[in-house]
Image (cartoon, helix red, strand yellow):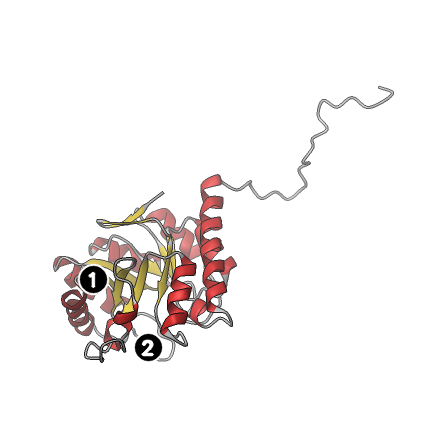
Amino acid sequence: MTWSVGSHSFTSRLIVGTGKYATFDQMNEALDASGAELVTVAIRRIRLDAAPGAGLLDHLDRARYRLLPNTAGCFSAEDAVLTARLAREALGTDLVKLEVIGDAKTLFPDGEETVRAARMLCADGFTVMPYCSDDPVVCRKLVDAGCPVVMPLAAPIGSGQGIRNITNLRIILETLDVPVIVDAGVGTASDAAVAMELGCSAVLMNTAIAGADDPVKMARAMRLGVEGGRLAFEAGRIPRRLYASASSPLDGVVFAGE
């Protein structure tokens, strides 16, 4: 089953980053193991003037992966819009992962600046995928600004803490009629599975894979976690009960001597 962001459709529900790998070969092995179709690139950290064969873009199979440039490193709406426009010219895509950071230590997003940048970019024809807090009000404002998806954090970027506020995620999922992608904070495959079991459309991660002892194995684990979580969501879990419910009910059973 495919899912969509604006006019873009995907099969894989795992989106992965390209940073922090020991080598480009390791990165490509991990991307392959993840099954991802959409991969993020930090446009402000790419050396577009790198010697042939020395830059990140030289090591990504553009026929296989669709690139999602992000505005990482931006602290104002104006910087993010400029970076997105540069990415569109350099990479030929209207997709952009919008990041406007409000605090350099925690890397928490600036909600006000993110919404402001989203309005400008959506009006300029971008398909905006905004990294944001798990604040349902901010998420609604981003959708009202024209974003076809929201990407609330599960926990601080790179922290590996997993989903810290399931209640807020549930509210976002129930009140918005757009795909919800968990972005940031995932640490292991069970975190990804939980996000998918809640009904999220996808999970985006980088550090959890690139920072693992074996990034390739972790990439495959994340793929399986996302796939398993989605299947469980679609299957519909049994309700939680306080008391036992026998797997083999005794109703209608006739016991010896009766």
- Identify the image quadrant of residue 165: bottom left
Amino acid type of the residue tagged 2 in the rendering: Asp
Provide the secondary structure element on which disc 1 rests.
helix
In this picture, is 243 found above or below 90?
above
Which residue matches tag 2?
Answer: 103
Which residue matches tag 1?
Answer: 118
Provide the secondary structure element on which disc 2 rests.
loop
Left or right of residue 141: residue 135 = right
Left or right of residue 143: residue 193 = right
The residues tagged by marks 2 and 1 sit, at their Cα atoms, a distance apart of 19 Å
What's the residue at 26%, 62% (across, down)? Answer: 68
| Nearer the observer, 35 or 159 | 35
Q: Position of residue 119 (x, y in %)?
A: 17, 60
Crowd band around label 2 with a 10 angstrom C-alpha radius: few (<14), some (14–19), many (20+): few
In this picture, is 94 found above or below 247?
below
Does residue 217 appear in the picture of this structure? yes
Query: Which residue occupies the extreme top position in the image?
Result: 258
Amino acid type of the residue tagged 1 in the rendering: Ala
